[in-house]
Image (tube, rainbow, N blue to C red):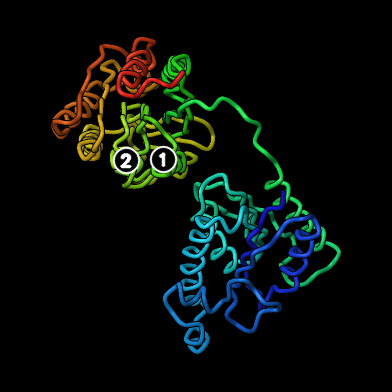
Amino acid sequence: MARTILLLGTLDTKGQEYAYVRDLITARGHDVLVMDLGIQGEPAFAPDVSAAEVARRGGTALEELRARGDRGTAVEVMLAGARTLAAELYEQGRFDAVLGMGGGGGTTMITAAMRALPVGVPKVMVSTMASGNTAPYVDVTDITLMYSVVDVAGLNPLSRRILANAAGAVCGMVEQDVPSAADRPLLAATMFGVTTPCVDAARARLEAAGYDVLVFHATGSGGRAMEGLIRDGYFTGVLDATTTEWCDEVVGGVLSAGPDRLTAAGRAGLPQVVSVGALDMVNFGAADTVPERFRERTLYRHNPTVTLMRTSVEECREIGRRIAERLSQATGPVVLVLPMRGVSMLDAEGQPFDDPEADRALFEALELHAGPGVRILEVDAHINDPVFAETLADELLRLVSPPEE
């Protein structure tokens, strides 16, 4: 069955390359839809969506962009237009996958449009930027980056092979069916290495009850990915056992998920069971990357590239306040479950982050600032004790609808 591939890029400077991949895709039996993002000159061939239309949807006439001669402004305008149009065209069923090619500016514009598409839509980006820091381009989506090795500037024996591989990759993606399976309702869960026993046990209990559990690593990107999929409507409920990303957001660690963490489920009205997993730690890189002002704090060398810092009493109070405020805004049911004997592997009796005073400050702040819609349940157990995992799972099962037989 023929599919349609959206080709997204600058046809004024890279038209030869786009014509090459277009012909490879159509030779394989698929259709193409071409959107032009170029502003420097006329396209090498006629696109289906013109650069003038993209610029207009980005808020500025193409002629004005050309007259200004400001490349930075042009990229911003074309990015906005491409992002809007790509989302609309996909909603209209106009394409099934997207392929782009470019350097720095092209990669910025094209991947922004790709990120506006749902997870699961095939997205392939051939880029000169794919060998460096790719986080600004991929973020928490499923974009496939292919390093171009040479610049996307003309056809030669090497670039033809690489571009042919990219065309074959995106065609293979749309040709690949997902084997049918008995889909079960989905639950989201968060985990860190130091809360793994808890989440593994809770997940097993939930899966035995008829759910599939998607576990997100609470590393900043993991929390943001979960929030995004919640907004997209994937889940029936959330087991947010590991809210540690709030430590990095409040204190200044490297694994923050941003201030919108713990908001998507509440806005969607989803049932949430939330806990305080790993709120005893802030994440930094190697030991020499820890900011000078923290060097005298309680630090733990997790591995050569990760150094953990114990959260203080004051920091725990602020973390608790912010979490409670987010949960209090939820439109659906919320249960906050507190492990009174420690919040991570390192926060157990005799362990490096054992600090009952800091934990007490955290719990008191949560209870003080939580609104009446948040049910708080104290469990006289450590977070990784089996009874605590059972409590989390059972509370969520009580809130969500039973899966259909």
Neighbor class of circle 1 (other Cα within 10 Å; few <14, some 14-19, many 20+) is few
Say what amino acid the circle numbered 2 marks: Ala
Say what amino acid the circle numbered 1 marks: Gly
Q: Earlier in the sequence, mark 2 or mark 1?
A: 1
Helix or strand or loop: what does disc 1 sit on? Answer: loop
Mark number, residue 268:
2
Query: Residue 262 falls in which quadrant of the image?
Result: top left
Q: Is residue 156 above or below residue 364?
A: below
Regarding residue 254, the answer to whether it shows in the image is no
| Residue in the foreground of this view, choosing between 334 and 388 | 334
Residue bearing mark 1: 233
Q: For this view, does 400 lie left or right of residue 147?
A: left
| Residue in the foreground of this view, choosing between 28 and 248 | 28
Q: Is the C-beta separation of discs 2 and 1 under 8 Å?
A: yes
Regarding residue 253, the answer to whether it shows in the image is yes
Residue drawn at the location 43% of the way across and 44% of the way down: 232
Q: For this view, does 198 lie left or right of residue 354?
A: right
Q: Is residue 27 above or below residue 357?
A: below
| Residue in the foreground of this view, choosing between 308 and 258 | 258
Query: Residue 161 falls in which quadrant of the image?
Result: bottom right
Residue 92 screen position, x and y as percent = 52, 58
